[in-house]
Amino acid sequence: MNRQEPVSDEALIEAIQKGDKNAAACLYNRHIDRVHRICYRIVLDVSQVQDCVQEVWLKVFRNLDRFRCRESFVAWLNTVTANTAIDYYRKWIKQGNRLNRDKAHIRAVAAERTGDQQLDNALIHQRVYEALEEMTVNQRTALVLRYFEDMPMAEIARTLGCTKGTVRTHIRRSLLALRAKLAGKPI
Amino acid sequence: MQNQHFSFEEFKALFQDSFDSQEELLNEYNSFLQTFEQLDQTPVPDLPYREKAKIFRRSWQGRPQESPWILTLLNFFRQPALTFALGIVIGCILMSVVMNNPIDLTGTASADELLEIEHTRYSRTYKGKIINDFYSEFENPKIILEKAGETEPPQRTLHGTLDNGEIYVVWNL
């Protein structure tokens, strides 16, 4: 493979469909961080994120034969990831589990990234995650896909199986909840 | 000032009905900018390299496995022009087989004749499934219609056996 010109996702998918493991590794490395990011922000429980990411990639490799190169792979992957994360979260909560946000971990991550404003950032981080936790999973997913992943409204609507108007309502409510939480007000 | 993720236009589309004037809306957007900045400061921890490798290994192994010759065969048939040509060839072969050896759909599936009639100069013998069913108490029943001479009236008799051929029965009908 040419190192100067990155191989397109479509070419990699074609190679994977013929059983090329190296192409699969290449596609995986290109998108694993995005999948992990979306799962992390939807599932919210640090101890469950890896299992959720695992489920997403199992689905991707099992269903890659059905993927048609006419559509964007990233859009398809985002949809698979979001739906898997939503189902995973619902199943997890239905089983009577409670979220383990691992506050120490969150603080450590925030502190590691920031430097001078360590405590402030740790607090912001904690509040953002508290706000995300208090939203419904659909509101959270709409916000994550729109704000963090720049996904268009129409695609989010398709992913969540609702109308664009409903997505707007989800995002609006989630933003208001976030602002209230970050300002220290009750939601 | 605009946020890279949430433009004022998008904000306006979301919150327009909540505010009376454009100025109020702009003020609200500016107050939201801080929230967006704070959102930008919430990183996601990296997934350790070892975990990434483990997830890949399991996912790759978990996909449906096909043996290499099946894959080769599938790839062979994935070429549309080839599949089309092959379809035409198979179609022609089938047509030629059907035209040369038309399948007989009228043949009876059962080997048993319903009624068999044997002719001789002065007699006719009737046997078969109908006679078997009608005289089910006899074994191998048959009705013989015979004339003693050309001018004599015909006489009907039933011939059969009982008790596995132990007793031979002749019955005038």
Image (cartoon, rainbow, N blue to C red):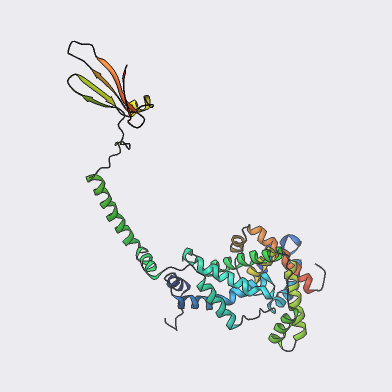
| Percent position of residue A122, x then y | 75, 81
Can residue B30 be seen?
no
Q: Is residue B150 above or below residue B31?
A: above
The residue positioned 66% from the left and 58% from the top of the image is: A165
Q: Which quadrant: the C terminus of chain B? A: top left
Is A67 on the left or on the right of A178, as rendered?
A: left
> Who is closer to the viewer here, A46 or B137?
B137
State which quadrant residue B80 falls in: bottom left
Q: Does A45 sit above or below residue B18?
A: below
Residue A139 percent location from the top left of the image: 69, 64
Q: Is residue A169 visible?
A: yes
Q: Residue at x 66, y 66 (%)?
A: A141
Instruction: Specify the farthest residue to the front.
Output: B166
Residue pushed farthest bottom?
A116
Q: Where is residue A110 shown, x and y percent of the image?
A: 71, 83
Frontmost residue, A158 versus B108: B108
Instruction: Determine the residue positioned at 31% across, 29% down.
Output: B128
Of residues B171 and B26, the one drawn nearer to the viewer in this rendering: B171
- Left or right of residue A126: residue B94: left
Instruction: Name above or below for residue B79 compared with residue B147.
Output: below
Q: Position of residue A73 (x, y in %)?
A: 51, 69
| Quadrant of the image occupied by residue A4 | bottom left
Tag count in the figure? 0
Q: Quadrant of the N terminus of chain B?
A: bottom right
In this image, A157 relative to B126: left or right?
Answer: right
Q: Is residue B100 left or right of residue B6?
A: left
